[in-house]
Image (spheres, grey):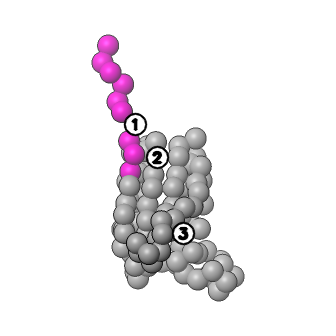
Amino acid sequence: DSPSPSPLIVCGIHACGHLTDSVLSYAISNSAAAIAVMPCCYTGTNPAGPYGLKRVFGSSWSSDIARSYLLSSKNYHTDFSSIPSSITPMNRILTAEAR
């Protein structure tokens, strides 16, 4: 018997622009057990979501909400967290765990 492979955990810290989406795509396509991304620099990111979301919450939140829906559709439980803004103002963390 060979040992079972270790679960894959994918992290992306200060993943600028579309790099966050590339990290999520990699994690999903490789069936990651857990994901944590801290998006940064939303320049070049396609702000997804309905107009009302973008108007009320802005492009960054709208993009991250759309990312959470993408992960949910791929059978991940998603949540948001943060680190202190004194460390970095780009402090939102999107977490996901395979169901």
Residue 48 visible in the displayed image: no
Residue linked to disc 2: 34
Residue positioned 30% across, 18% down in the render: 2
Residue linked to disc 3: 64
Please give the range of residues in magenta. 1-10
Magenta segment: does it hold 78? no
Magenta segment: does it hold 8? yes
Residue 10 picture location, percent across and down: 38, 51
Which amino acid type is shown beneath numbered disc 3?
Asp
Which SS does the magenta portion mostly show?
loop
Which amino acid type is shown beneath numbered disc 1?
Pro
Q: Identify the residue at the far top of this view.
A: 1
In the displayed structure, 60 sits above or below 1; it is below
Of callouts 2 and 3, which one flags the residue occurring earlier in the amino acid sequence?
2
Residue positioned 36% across, 25% down in the render: 4
Residue linked to disc 1: 7
Quadrant in which the N terminus is drawn = top left
Quadrant in which the C terminus is drawn = top right
> Is label 3 in a helix, a strand or a loop?
helix
Which amino acid type is shown beneath numbered disc 2?
Ala
Of callouts 2 and 1, which one flags the residue occurring earlier in the amino acid sequence?
1
Residue positioned 52% across, 52% down in the render: 96
- Report crowding for label 3: few under 14, some 14 to 19, many 20 or more residues within 10 A (C-alpha): many
